[in-house]
Image (cartoon, rainbow, N blue to C red):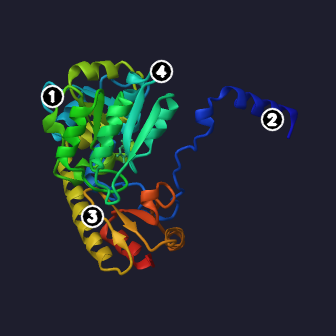
Amino acid sequence: MTNKAAEIDELVARWVRPQIRQLSAYQVADAEGLIKLDAMENPYQWPEALREEWLDLLRKAEINRYPHPQAPGVKAGLRRTMAIPDGMPLVLGNGSDELIQMIAMTVAGPGRKVLSIEPSFVMYRMIATFLGMEYQGVALNPDFSLDITSLLSEIERTQPALIFLAYPNNPTGNLFAQDDLLRVIEAAPGLVVIDEAYAPFTDVSFVPKLGQYANLLVMRTVSKMGLAGLRLGLLTGPAAWINEIEKTRLPYNINVLTQISAEFSLNHQSVFDRQTAAIRQARDTLLGQLQCIDGIEPFASHANFILVRLAPGRADHVFHDLRQCGVLVKNMHGSHPLLADCLRVTVGTPEENSAFLAAFRP
Ligand SMILES: Cc1ncc(COP(=O)(O)O)c(C=O)c1O
């Protein structure tokens, strides 16, 4: 190693916080040339006529200017299509990932804690770590339901500033009992954020409960319904909370192209509704097909993916074999004890799902 390289390593070791050095960066697999069933994307493009209309708008985009700081057109579209009640303001994020960070920054401080359940979306823990907050994960029951006794006692013990609950949960795909979630909201001393990233694939929501609880916020994203490339998420709830969180938002975080594209596409919500309805149907078909395969355990899902448990020791092999056959899924084995031997497959088009099944040798 050259002297300069050693000097750099020394400085990095001295100054980068140990919590950051110990982290691994969020991994995104290379999907080049593969059928991409790893990231809960909507597999469908837009009809050609709609693309043309959209491109006409983009041609006029003033990318020499900063975007509108508040993105009012985007907010109006989200409010309308997601039935956000009047009086509940929105704050927008560059994906809901950024909102998780903004919420955590708003409440971070010495001794402040973030709590979530495990296994769940990994960014809750990662962002708590970025901000030097203590993170407490409470394991789900083996059937992925909430262990409400442990959860309530951990809330009592740790007094978390912030609780994230994904509903439906990723990577398990299930919904928790509403009554249990209400007990958590009532017991929590701080904020409870219900993360409804998979709302397009289920019929239940906490949006109608907004305002009934002083500590309840709901987070959504447009990623899973078909706009993952735009990077746009929203958080809503009582104004007093949203106004504080809004202060942590970086200026112009929703860029010009995203604003134009989101506003346009939310005016064509029926296209997404048809696509997500097709994905739901394909999910149920795929689940039925997986249930017919001996020796594996597919878990029922209210999202656009299915978690499957394979025979002990098979997950790595099956993951690599699928990849060899051109199909990329997510290998969950090793990420949490409750996910031993599990793969997570995103629901694609019927053709993609058939290709997955043809290559799947559990
Ligand atoms: C539960 C949950 N919340 C949030 C996200 C992030 O969504 P976004 O694309 O809006 O950052 C994901 C992505 O997988 C997720 O599973």
| Quadrant in the picture for residue 79 | top left
Q: Residue 5's mark? A: 2
Instruction: Give how far apart the Cα atoms at labels 4 and 1 are.
Output: 29 Å
Q: Nearer the viewer, residue 55 or 191?
A: 191
Element under disc 1 = loop
Disc 4 residue: CB within 8 Å of ligand 1: no
Instruction: Identify which residue is drawn at 37% across, 47% down.
Output: 228
Instruction: Identify which residue is drawn at 16% across, 32% down.
Output: 210
At label 2, which amino acid type do we have? Ala
Look at discs 3 and 4 and give the one toward the viewer. Answer: 4
Element under disc 3 = loop
Q: Which badge, 2 or 1, comes first in the chain's sequence?
A: 2
**Which residue is denoted by mark 1 in the rendering?**
211
Look at discs 4 and 1 and give the one toward the viewer. Answer: 4
Residue 308 lies left or right of residue 174; in this view the side is right
Q: Position of residue 200 (x, y in %)?
A: 23, 50
**Which residue is denoted by mark 4 in the rendering?**
110
Q: Is residue 79 visible?
A: yes
Image quarter (top left, top right, bottom left or bottom right) of the C terminus = bottom left
Look at discs 3 and 2 and give the one toward the viewer. Answer: 3
**Which residue is denoted by mark 3 in the rendering?**
300
Q: Residue 90's mark? A: none
Residue 70 lies left or right of residue 343; in this view the side is left
Asked if the residue at tag 1 contacts the one at tag 2, i.e. Cβ–Cβ closer than 8 Å, the answer is no
Up-down: is 99 above or below 247?
below
Instruction: Identify which residue is drawn at 28% across, 33% down.
Output: 192
Ligand 1 is in which quadrant of the figure? top left
Instruction: Give how far apart the Cα atoms at labels 1 and 3 are.
Output: 31 Å
